[in-house]
Image: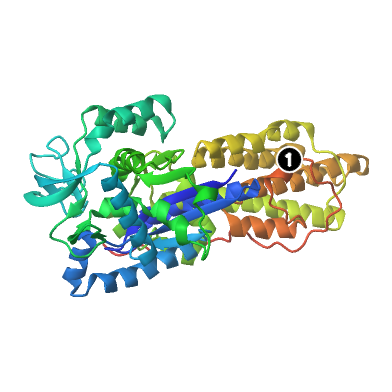
Amino acid sequence: MAYYVTTPIYYVNGEPHLGHVYTTVAADVLARHMRQRGEEVFFLTGTDEHGEPVAQAAEREGVPPRELAERNAERFKEVARRVDATNDFFIRTSDPEHETVVAEIAARLKDNGHVYEGVYEGLYCPRCADFKTDSEVVDANKCPIHLIELEREQEQNWFFRMSAFQEPLERLYTERPDWVGPRNRYNEALSFIRGGLNDLSLSRARLSWGVPVPWDPEQVIYVWIDALLNYYSALTYARPGEDLRDRFWPPTVHLIAKDILKFHAIIWPAMLMAAEIELPRKLFIHGYLLMDEHKMSKSLGNVLDPFEVMDVYGTDALRYYLLREVSFGQDGSISPEGFETRYNTELANEYGNLASRTFAMIGKYRDGVVPAADPAPEVAMQFDGLAAAVKERIDAVEVSAALDDVWERVRALNRFVTEREPWKLAKDEAAATELDCVLYTLAEGLRVVSILLTPWMPSTTARLLAALGQPDESLASAELGAVGGGATLAELGQLFPRVEPRAEASA
């Protein structure tokens, strides 16, 4: 079955930051894992380039919106490359092919009787590009996200009759209780729907930076309707000469952050229903990465800037940390200190040192050739069903829990070394068979955990598997004992070399 995963498209009104990296890496983990399963995968990311936030940012810089979009879109493309994302396409909403689809769908909504002309009056947040109801604002007139005072605006607009989809949306949530995850976000979206849906302004009259309304070119399509359609439009032109909608639509999972829940979990399905397009299979909403800004400015020179982390520690270390430190789907705190602890104790010591010791012992005791043996029963028992458990976690978008499951086996292998003491067995000729079993189990265990860790740390695991003489990364081979002995090990080196702590910045 084809697998289609998307990130949100990122606003080009600012620089890429850690939050963008977080979502992109999580989507990449899903995509890589599914490719390991032999699935046909399409992974989409990109940039949201229209609307008031971009127009205002361009005005502040004194450049045309298109110039700002061109410059920052390249930066977001570079971020995807730097974090080793394997996206199949990078969409830009200023692409003419995307704009054509937006105009077509908007016209379809009107032809289907879901669009009418009217006057909008209400509070509007230019940074969210969103009209706020009285129940959504704080302190009477402030945006709950940006905490800026909102002005009451009035415009002659075209409206999408979203209120007509209240009952269909409630039915959707009843019939598909796993459509939005995790559960607290499902409850949040359903509560919003049950609170009563208002019709949605489909156009903006005072903006020129956007997709013109097909039947009223003096107005442009509201940026969120434009943006949400990227998931659909991309499939029409991602591969020249091919329409991929039959193969990949509907999306398997949209990954989004919780601040854009309303747009994706309410407006998006209502639009698709109105346009008679099949709904996505699942939305998964993740939380925020929280940082103590004071601490960040006082220690390690902002080492959790994603680019600096990758320069100093490597890309795989950043990918691992982001999905290990905070349970995906929840809010959680990250810090330079937390990163260094994970790097040193888990990556360098638990995984890196396990690999180094295993290679060294096989080199010393068996001339670098993995001995032929059966895996030790106590380890085989702990690995039994691991690949299936990881598959189940990934299907539920539990990318942190899946990583935790694999890491438990990394620690199990380290305990196995401590308990079986192969250096002592090597001194006893009568224990040669037992030593073969221990060394084989370590090499085979490393092979299996490395295959399973590949979506999170692709460069590191590829290097280790190649050194093991077992480059196959397919999930079908991720079973302890699936590969016998006989492989000659190559030079490995340190997977996660020690990094000297950076001098703290002065106060």
Which quadrant of the figure contains the C terminus?
Answer: bottom left
User: Which corner quadrant of the image does residue 37 belong to?
Assistant: top right
What residue is shown at x 21% (from left), y 69% (from top)?
58
Amino acid type at mark 1: Glu
Where is residue 501 shown, x and y percent of the image?
45, 61
Classed neighbour count for the residue bearing mark 1: other residues with Cα under 10 Å, few (<14), some (14–19), many (≥20): many
Q: Which residue is mark 1?
A: 479
Front residue of 416 and 23: 23
| Colour scheme employed for the rendering of this structure | rainbow
Question: Can residue 500 be seen in this snapshot?
Answer: no
Depicted 172 relative to depicted 211: above or below: above
Q: What percent of the width, then of the height, locates residue 314?
A: 52, 62
Which of the image's four quarters has the N terminus? Answer: top right
| Front residue of this view, candidates 250 and 147 | 250
Label 1 residue SS: loop
> At which x and y percent is residue 134?
12, 37
Residue at horizontal 86 percent and vertical 58 percent from the top: 367
**Residue 316 located left or right of residue 98:** right
Most extreme residue toward the right, as rendered? 430
Residue 161 in the image: state x and y as whole percent.
Answer: 22, 39
Image label count: 1
